[in-house]
């Protein structure tokens, strides 16, 4: 009995500690991952266990969730865990396009006795033949290697060999708590009930958007004035109403679907035409180089000079791995109409075909 208890205590000592507080977990000053303890444990459990029944066939773990919900942040924190870092000799980051274009020779996938963790991000689906070539090549990796798939595409769960981990939006209670922690900083919300009331109402309006929460929290933390907070609340209330009226969808839902969002009501000065936020793009997109840049927080706070033509809106730059930049192009409605006409304009070859 004593021997069994000793083994049990040793076993518990080797396990990662779980935190009792559901909100304080992973809450650090400035750089933090909020919550996600359950999801983190699920991912780590897969990464640290043996591949069965074939130890040389890498287990494939899909991590699925809507846009901008924190999938890559979750993986980054798992990869930075000391147990995971010591378990794998190397970590390889790829995207779906890489896989489709790869030549599967001996140099394309690392081979050797050490375990390799491959993280693949998919923006679109992949055909089964391309995936089969990749997974066959991945068998050359060391025993116990793993593959993580990151995507918002539910169909990609078919590629998994283990149960997928789904990263969902935070509950309203969690989201509201997180927003107030970010917005108040070191200030106690209970000492400012009017500000806390505004924060609670705004948390409901934002619909769980982590990007919007961070943008608003940044400007609130630097200006804890009730009138200013109410001004921002009214702005965002009008934005939500405008999108519900025009598109019959909440801005958060349109963001998840990569649809343009009407942000005219965020601009303090009157504009000649409605202003729309276009779907996000990569920071190295050549098509947006040279555009004027405006910080989203400055636009909301009313401290930005709005360009007369399209511009790049910098929503935020993540302070935690993978340090992602959230960028969108803002266009006025007359520019949208002009670009649509250009896309619809037939090419000279098409004109000749019709004339012939």
Image: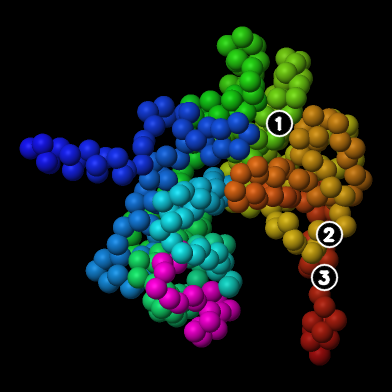
Q: Which span of residues is magenta-colored?
A: 99-117
Question: Image quadrant for the N terminus?
Answer: top left
Q: Is residue 135 highlighted in magenta?
A: no
x and y, in percent, of residue 169 in the image:
49, 40
x and y, in percent, of residue 70 in the image:
54, 46
Q: Kindly identify which numbered label has been placed on residue 345.
A: 3
Name which quarter of the figure residue 15 lies in. Answer: top left
The residue that disc 2 covers is 289
Q: Nearer the viewer, residue 73 or 194?
A: 73
Q: Is residue 9 left or right of residue 275?
A: left
| Alpha carbon separation for disc pair 2 and 1 | 26 Å
Q: Residue furthest left?
A: 1
x and y, in percent, of residue 140 in the image:
41, 78
The residue that disc 1 covers is 218
Q: Which mark is in front, 3 or 2?
A: 2
Q: What residue sits 86% from the left and 36% below the top?
A: 304
Whether residue 216 is visible, yes or no, is yes
x and y, in percent, of residue 283 in the image:
73, 56
Q: What residue sits 77% from the left and 32% below the top?
A: 300
Question: Image quadrant for the C terminus?
Answer: bottom right
């Amino acid at each position: 009995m004593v021997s069994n208890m000793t083994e049990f205590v040793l076993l518990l000592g080797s396990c990662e500690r779980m935190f009792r507080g559901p909100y304080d977990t992973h809450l650090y000053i400035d750089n933090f991952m909020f919550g996600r303890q359950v999801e983190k444990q699920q991912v780590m459990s897969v990464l640290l266990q043996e591949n069965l029944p074939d130890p040389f066939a890498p287990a494939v773990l899909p991590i699925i969730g809507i846009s901008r919900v924190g999938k890559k942040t979750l993986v980054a924190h798992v990869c930075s865990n000391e147990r995971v870092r010591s378990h794998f000799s190397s970590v390889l980051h790829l995207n779906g396009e890489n896989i489709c274009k790869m030549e599967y020779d001996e140099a394309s996938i690392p081979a050797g006795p050490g375990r390799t963790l491959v993280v693949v991000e998919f923006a679109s689906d992949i055909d089964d033949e391309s995936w089969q070539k990749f997974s066959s090549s991945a068998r050359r990796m060391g025993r116990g290697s793993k593959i993580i798939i990151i995507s918002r595409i539910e169909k990609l769960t078919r590629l998994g060999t283990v149960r997928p981990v789904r990263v969902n939006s935070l509950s309203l209670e969690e989201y509201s708590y997180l927003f107030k922690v970010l917005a108040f900083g070191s200030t106690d919300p209970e000492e400012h009930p009017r500000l806390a009331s505004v924060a609670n109402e705004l948390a409901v309006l934002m619909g769980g958007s982590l990007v919007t929460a961070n943008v608003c929290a940044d400007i609130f933390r630097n200006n804890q004035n009730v009138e200013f907070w109410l001004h921002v609340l009214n702005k965002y209330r009008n934005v939500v109403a405008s999108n519900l009226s025009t598109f019959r969808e909440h801005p958060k839902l349109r963001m998840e679907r990569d649809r343009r969002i009407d942000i005219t009501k965020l601009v303090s000065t009157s504009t000649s035409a409605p202003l729309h936020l276009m779907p996000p793009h990569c920071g190295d997109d050549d098509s947006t180089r040279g555009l004027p840049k405006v910080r989203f927080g400055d636009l909301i706070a009313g401290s930005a000079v709005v360009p007369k033509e399209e511009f790049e809106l910098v929503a935020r730059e993540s302070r935690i791995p993978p340090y992602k930049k959230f960028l969108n192009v803002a266009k006025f409605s007359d520019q949208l109409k002009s670009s649509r006409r250009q896309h619809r304009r037939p090419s000279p070859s098409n004109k000749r075909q019709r004339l012939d």
